[in-house]
Amino acid sequence: MLRLDEPPESGLLQIEIPVAPVSFQATTPKKAGIVAAVRAAIADCAFLLSGDVKVQIRWGISVRARYESDGSADVDNIVKPILVALSGPDGVLIDDCQVQELTC
């Protein structure tokens, strides 16, 4: 859990969420689960980032699961639920339009 009263001086905010990513095309309960996990991880942040940000998402998945089945989410579909969770009154961003660079 993060316990931050103000943004770090380094400008780097690292959040680890030990759950599998969920596709934007997933059912509403599944998307709500990832949003809840992200929001729980940032719950102790007592600030909002108001400027432009870069977001880097790292997720581990076996090559076999990714290429030999259709059970894993595509990278372009996992981004939106995470950005939704990071934004708004319960997030650390005002709006996901602040994201000027995204890597995954």
Image (cartoon, rainbow, N blue to C red):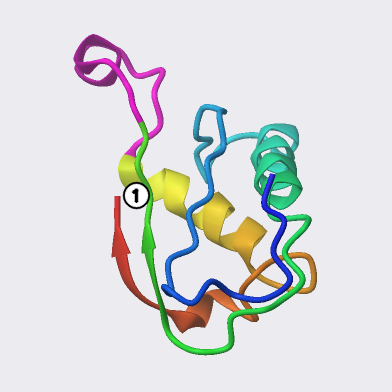
- Residue 51 lies, in percent from the top left, at 50, 89
- Residue 104 lies, in percent from the top left, at 29, 50
Q: Is residue 89 left or right of residue 50?
A: right
The outermost residue toward the bottom is 51
Q: Residue at the location (48% across, 82% down)?
A: 98
Mark 1 crowdedness (10 Å alpha carbons): few <14, some 14-19, many ≥20: few
Q: Residue 41 or 9: which is nearer the viewer? A: 9
Q: Secondary structure at mark 1?
A: helix
**Residue designated by label 1:** 76
User: Considering only vertical position in the picture, is 92 above or below 85?
Assistant: below
Q: Is residue 35 magenta?
A: no
Question: Where on the picture, by quarter, is residue 55?
Answer: bottom left
User: Considering only vertical position in the picture, is 30 above or below 69?
Assistant: below
User: Considering only vertical position in the picture, is 70 above or below 34?
Assistant: above
- At label 1, which amino acid type do we have? Asp
**Total number of numbered labels?**
1
Q: Is residue 9 left or right of residue 72?
A: right
Magenta span: predominant SS is: loop
Question: Where on the picture, by quarter, is residue 103?
Answer: bottom left
Position of the N terminus by quadrant = top right
Q: Residue at the location (32% across, 22% down)?
A: 61
Q: Residue at the location (72% across, 51% down)?
A: 39
Highlighted range, magenta: 60-74
- Residue 35 lies, in percent from the top left, at 68, 47
